[in-house]
Image: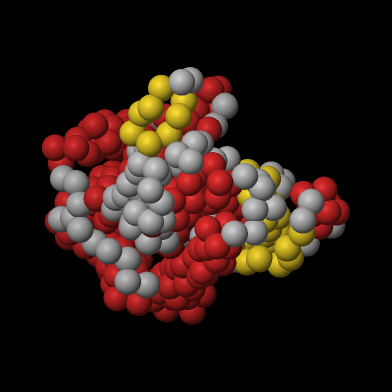
Amino acid sequence: MNLPRIKALLNKEIKQALRDKRMRMIIFISPLVQLFLFGYAVNTDVREIRTVVCDQSNTSISRGLTDAFQASGYFRIVQRVRDPREAEPLIDRGKAQVILVIPEDFSRSLRRGQPADVQLIVEGTDSIVASNAVSYGNMIIAAHLQKIAQPLPTINTVTQTGKHIPRTKPVVRVWFNPDLKSRNYFVPGVIALLLTLVSLILTSFSIVREWEIGTMEQLIVTPLRPTELIVGKTLPFFLVGMIDLTLIFLVGTLWFRIPFRGNIVLLAFSAVLYLINALSVGIFISTISRTQQQALMGVIFFFMPAMLLSGFVFPIFNIPLVLRWIAYINPLTYFLIIVRGIFLKGVGITVLWPQLLFLVITGPILLEISVKRFYKQLD
């Protein structure tokens, strides 16, 4: 491998990329724009869930519970009714999402040390809202019961199947993301998505453009070997990927205040391994495309399923089994685990070694497949 020849091609690629205004937009502006869009728009935090209260007890204890719901910020009481059936039309018309039903004997049962039921009726069309409503509701009820436990003389015991057992006091702890901000979860994942998208687009477009404008034949007749040609074509975009990683890291931590608890060297090393995978896929897409439009369609065809089957939005264990196997061979799946683990948990290589090992193995395999396909195209 001749380093001066590679250096000459590298200089040519960098100058050509920076000379093109659209390419400069893709390299520097597009990642930041997408980061801000994802950071602000992709948000599954559920606030002010429209709630109807049916307080049949109407005591200071029950009113305190409804006040706790209102004060939490997760629920917004839109109406109070005496009969739960009065709230059903509000659910049907979309004016309410939750009905909080406090039975008539609620306070009396608590004072007697007996179990006291509280019912949450949740409109389940939106599963995210529904699951969060149930989770938040249970936390608020548990916290309120713990708060009023001291003034009630017999609250520490309950009667169940004729036996007296201690009443438990739930203690809720949230690790790694105590404020339950979905932004802390999504923004680190955006790093992986943007590295993937930028690498795929730039690599596939760069090689296809040579075919499209007729300059690939000129490169072939130069002293450049195929390996040197591939290195010279992909190395600039590898450097671009690392620059984008730095930009996104700085904006995520300084602007969005995403906690970073891990090792930045491990993050950079992981990004290097993943970029080899992503650039290899970009080379492969370029070998099956003859125009930039075809390359763009190839990028979309790969990127959308890779994103959806990576765990970026939906947990992998919620994906059907057949598609789950595809997710398990998706390099983006493992890089997402690495990035989120380093950012939010601060874990190191002792925990992330299986994901790193996968990227170490798949990178050379994908690169070999793509290079062989590229050689075949040159022939």
**Residue 264 seen:** yes
Residue 96 falls left or right of residue 158: right
Q: Position of residue 64 (x, y in %)?
A: 52, 63
Q: Position of residue 4 (x, y in %)?
A: 17, 60
Is 14 situated above or below 319? below
Is 226 situated above or below 140? above
Q: Which of the two residues, 341 or 158, is positioned nearer the viewer here?
A: 158
Rendered residue at 79%/51% (across/down): 83
Quadrant (top left/top right/bottom left/bottom right) for the C terminus: top left
Q: Which of the two residues, 50 or 227, is positioned nearer the viewer here?
A: 50
Residue 133 falls left or right of residue 221: right
Q: Position of residue 7 (x, y in %)?
A: 21, 62
**Residue 276 seen:** no
Q: Position of residue 27 (x, y in %)?
A: 41, 70
Is 368 situated above or below 3? above
Q: Indicate the quadrant where residue 331 lies.
A: top left
Rendered residue at 64%/59% (across/down): 58
Rendered residue at 67%/56% (across/down): 55
Q: How many marks?
A: 0
Q: Indicate the quadrant where residue 180 lies.
A: bottom left
Is 316 situated above or below 301? above
Rendered residue at 37%/61% (across/down): 179
Residue 190 falls left or right of residue 118: left
Q: Which of the two residues, 44 or 49, is positioned nearer the viewer here?
A: 49
Q: Indicate the quadrant where residue 378 lies.
A: top left
